[in-house]
Amino acid sequence: MIKPIYLDYNGTTPHDPEVVNTMLPFLKEHFGNPSSSHYYGIVPTEGVEKARKQVANLLKCQPEEIIFTSGGTESNNHAIQGIAFSLRDKGNHIISSQVEHPAVLEVCKYLERFGFETTYLPVDEYGLVDPVDLEAAIKPETILFTIMHANNEVGTLQPISEFSKIARKHQIIMHTDAAQSVGKVPTDVNSLGVDLLSIAGHKLYAPKGVGVLYVRQSIDLWKFCHGAGQENRARAGTENVVGIVGLGQACEIAGRNLLDSIKKMENLRDLLHEGLFSQLDDIRLNGHPKQRLPNTLSVSVKGLEANKVLEKIKGEVAASAGAACHSGGVDVSHVLKAMQVPLEWAKGTLRFSVGRMTTTEQIEHTIEIVVKAIKNQPGPLEIS
Ligand SMILES: Cc1ncc(COP(=O)(O)O)c(C=O)c1O
């Protein structure tokens, strides 16, 4: 069976073969617990500490500033709840944005039960938060900014370093969810100026169920996952050694090839853009035309039902939709809503995200398949 062309790298990535080779000895032989002081604990401990250095090299920070977690969701929970509870005597106000992943939005909502309050900043038509709005939203009680680096749906890159300058000026902690940007664009924590940064392993060719929280050394962060003293007492639970060594290697590969990879992604993404825009009418780009992830192309076709098109081509291309149409109506993503994409466009939103294994031939083939499927779609559909 020929598998569909995979264009959903923002959803998850395949494992890089080099990542697999790094993990294999830890699956086959080095099963020991890093906490064991006997023979079997030695290689797993070395593996985890090597990975810590590899992640730190990519982020340009100290290895001691890296906490391994179970993924992007846990990293965000740890960062936001850890700061909220550590600084609750100082204030109860958090500033975030309307386009965050649920792994941030739901944490802020949960904290409201404990007396915290969040301001969700609006975005412009490109999905950008305005630094002027951010500064204007600060109150004496503001303790934390949590704004994503890159948006998972449209790829827009926020001006995080500008937000960090504002944070520093007002002595507010700055966290960014970099689940989508690490490995795709430079994520040097000092250039970004952030105090905390979240990584999800499975977005950069490492396995699912492993992630990182970077915590600047000066930050006092409350523990999120309680138990034994692993991760220098910062995160309890026996380490996911296999996942951690895989993530370390994935970070090394990302750092080694970053500039080449950006160029390659952009070329493939732009080829797809060109192919679709030259053959389809009533098509628009979502997200910022330039300040955007190199691999992400979100487009809307007026009057189309994107999930019907994806259903039709699911044997040939795997991509994702920006809205789910069902008998009760249309559920448009909160990101497209915040960007004020009109409903008749939003429901026709297709997100393509290319990656390391994508080829020019796959993109050319995708253009043919998608154009044909859309042109054969019955005329503008009624908006329910
Ligand atoms: C921006 C963003 N943040 C957080 C997450 C959650 O990461 P994980 O799946 O590792 O929990 C994702 C995953 O889709 C994401 O895209």
Image (spheres, helix red, strand yellow):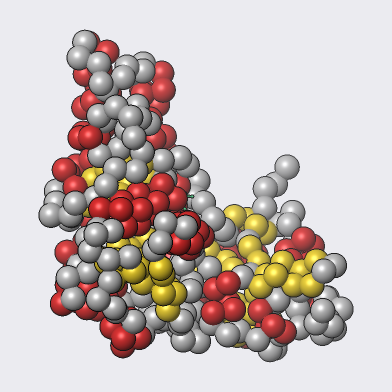
- The picture places residue 182, in percent across and down from the top left corner, at 34, 58
380 sits left or right of 168 in the view: right
The structure residue drawn at horizontal position 67% and vertical position 53%, both measured from the top left corner, is 4
Q: Is residue 79 visible?
A: no
Q: Quadrant of the N terminus?
A: top right
Q: Quadrant of residue 348?
A: bottom right
The structure residue drawn at horizontal position 23% and vertical position 25%, both measured from the top left corner, is 45
Q: Nearer the viewer, residue 332 or 49?
A: 332
In this rendering, the answer to whether 65 lies above or below 284 is above
Q: Quadrant of residue 54?
A: top left
- The picture places residue 206, in percent across and down from the top left corner, at 41, 43
In this rendering, the answer to whether 258 lies above or below 55 is below
The structure residue drawn at horizontal position 48% and vertical position 72%, both measured from the top left corner, is 99
Q: Is residue 171 visible?
A: yes
In this rendering, the answer to whether 19 lies above or below 241 is below
- The picture places residue 149, in percent across and down from the top left corner, at 36, 67
